[in-house]
Image: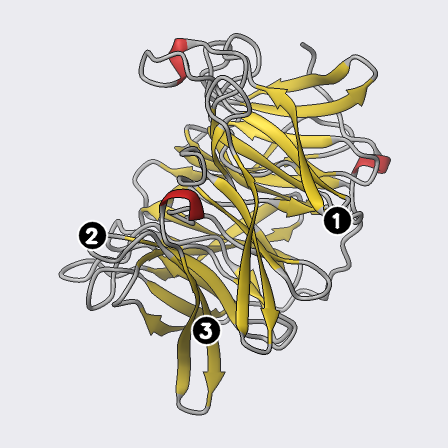
């Protein structure tokens, strides 16, 4: 396989605002979870309310879908749907997305036929109605444990599964031949949803463990990362192209210099895509990278191994005011993670740690991907922390 290059046709167009300099960040915990745990990343509706999922936890059931609504007295949580487990699905650990008419889509890691589901929530006068769109059939067929999903302009759903598929290499799952992951599509047809397994990862050439949905380009090409592999310990970035004989791939192989373990959603801005790796890179603590028209991968920033500027970025990036924003799992003042900002300057990118999560008796670990509102504020969650150590939702203003 040869490294690929992006072309202008494969990249979406992003409209940016002017850069606003950072003079310090204001951080506020807007909600502390106590009756359900491990909140996912958040998403906005058109009115500025926040939505996400909790996966339950000991004694908290199979998981919930929630809404956070702002008022003068603070933020209030409402449970929109509680999963029943089994055929209904359980562990909705990934983020949610809205379609243009206000329906919510998400996945569960388990349930259905035992291997996870894709679901839809439809709002109505009497609350939200949940519909299971697809139940995965298992490791030797179409995969299991789906990631977050994305929608294209035609209303088709795309996603990945961490495991499963037809390439059953035992190195992918603790010596068990269960498959190395898949890329799938769900298409609406005659009132039903039809599933197509577009691609099965081969550990020997593609890598395994796709941890995010594919990026769907305007020309129909898909871009997806795999965290590691027998071919490529550092992970891969695949370009998938539809052809009459199936989907073909071209790959970039990550290495010690570019960073290893690509993870999280890919972000598109102009004629480039941006992402993160969890480890290695020039300074040893993971990287933020760019894939552009002329170069395969350019490291924009390398986190230090001592963690003073953050260590191990674990989720995708967010664009706000011409800067890139993200979180790290470790590092910062308490080694419990950071919120960071990268801003472009002449010939380089400058990193600024906006916030270090506290340690001590109430650690806030595993911060989510950030989302931005229209007023320059960023929102996210932590899987742990808070009074019950069940996680929090927060707001930060750079």
Q: Residue at x 40, y 80 (%)?
A: 76
Mark 3 secondary-structure assignment: strand
Sequence order check, earlier mark of 2 and 3: 2
Q: CA distance from mark 2 to mark 3?
A: 23 Å
Front in this rendered view, residue 320 or 202? 202
Q: Does residue 56 show up?
A: yes
Q: Is 143 left or right of 383, judged from the image as shown? A: right
Q: Residue at x 47, y 17 (%)?
A: 179
Sequence order check, earlier mark of 2 and 1: 2
Mark 1 secondary-structure assignment: loop
Which residue, given by chain and number where applicable, does mark 1 sit on? 155
Q: Residue at x 80, y 50 (%)?
A: 13
Front in this rendered view, residue 245 or 211? 245
Sequence order check, earlier mark of 3 and 1: 3
Which residue, given by chain and number where applicable, does mark 3 sit on? 68
Q: Are marks 2 and 1 in contact (CB under 8 Å)?
A: no
Which residue, given by chain and number where applicable, does mark 2 sit on? 58
Mark 2 secondary-structure assignment: loop
Q: Where, by quadrant of the figure, is residue 3 drawn?
A: top right
Task: Count numbered badges in the picture.
Answer: 3
Percent across and percent down for residue 197 are 64, 25
Q: Is 255 left or right of 241, judged from the image as shown? A: left
Q: CA distance from mark 2 to mark 1?
A: 36 Å
Q: Are marks 3 and 1 in contact (CB under 8 Å)?
A: no
Q: Does residue 342 show up?
A: no
């Amino acid at each position: 396989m040869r490294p690929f290059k992006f072309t202008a046709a494969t990249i979406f167009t992003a409209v940016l605002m002017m850069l606003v300099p950072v003079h310090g960040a204001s951080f506020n915990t807007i909600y502390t979870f106590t009756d359900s745990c491990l909140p996912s990343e958040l998403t906005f509706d058109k009115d500025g309310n926040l939505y996400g999922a909790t996966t339950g936890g000991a004694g908290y059931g199979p998981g919930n879908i929630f809404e956070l609504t702002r008022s003068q007295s603070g933020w209030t949580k409402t449970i929109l749907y509680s999963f029943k487990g089994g055929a209904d699905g359980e562990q909705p650990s990934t983020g949610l997305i809205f379609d243009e008419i206000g329906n919510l889509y998400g996945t569960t890691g388990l349930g259905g036929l035992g291997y996870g589901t894709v679901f839809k929530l439809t709002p109505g006068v009497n609350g939200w109605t949940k519909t299971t769109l697809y139940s995965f059939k298992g490791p030797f067929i179409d995969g299991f444990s789906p990631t977050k999903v994305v929608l294209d302009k035609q209303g088709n759903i795309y996603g990945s599964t961490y495991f499963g598929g037809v390439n059953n290499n035992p190195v992918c799952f603790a010596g068990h031949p269960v498959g190395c992951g898949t890329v799938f599509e769900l298409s609406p047809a005659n009132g039903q949803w039809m599933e197509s397994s577009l691609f099965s990862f081969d550990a020997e050439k593609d890598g395994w463990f796709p941890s995010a949905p594919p990026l769907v380009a305007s020309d129909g090409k898909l871009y997806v990362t795999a965290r590691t592999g027998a071919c490529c310990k550092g992970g891969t970035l695949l370009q998938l192209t539809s052809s009459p004989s199936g989907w073909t791939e071209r790959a970039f192989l990550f290495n010690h210099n570019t960073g290893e373990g690509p993870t999280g959603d890919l972000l598109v801005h102009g004629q480039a895509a941006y992402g993160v790796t969890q480890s290695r890179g020039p300074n040893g603590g993971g990287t933020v990278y760019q894939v552009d028209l002329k170069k395969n991968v350019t490291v924009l920033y390398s986190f230090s191994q001592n963690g003073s500027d953050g260590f191990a970025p674990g989720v995708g990036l967010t664009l706000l005011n011409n800067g890139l924003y993200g979180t790290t799992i470790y590092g910062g003042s308490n080694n419990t993670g950071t919120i960071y900002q990268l801003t472009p300057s002449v010939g380089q990118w400058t990193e600024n740690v906006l916030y270090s999560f506290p340690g001590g008796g109430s650690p806030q670990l595993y911060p989510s991907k950030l989302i931005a509102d229209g007023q320059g504020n960023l929102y996210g969650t932590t899987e742990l922390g808070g009074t019950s150590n069940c996680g929090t939702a927060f707001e930060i203003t750079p």
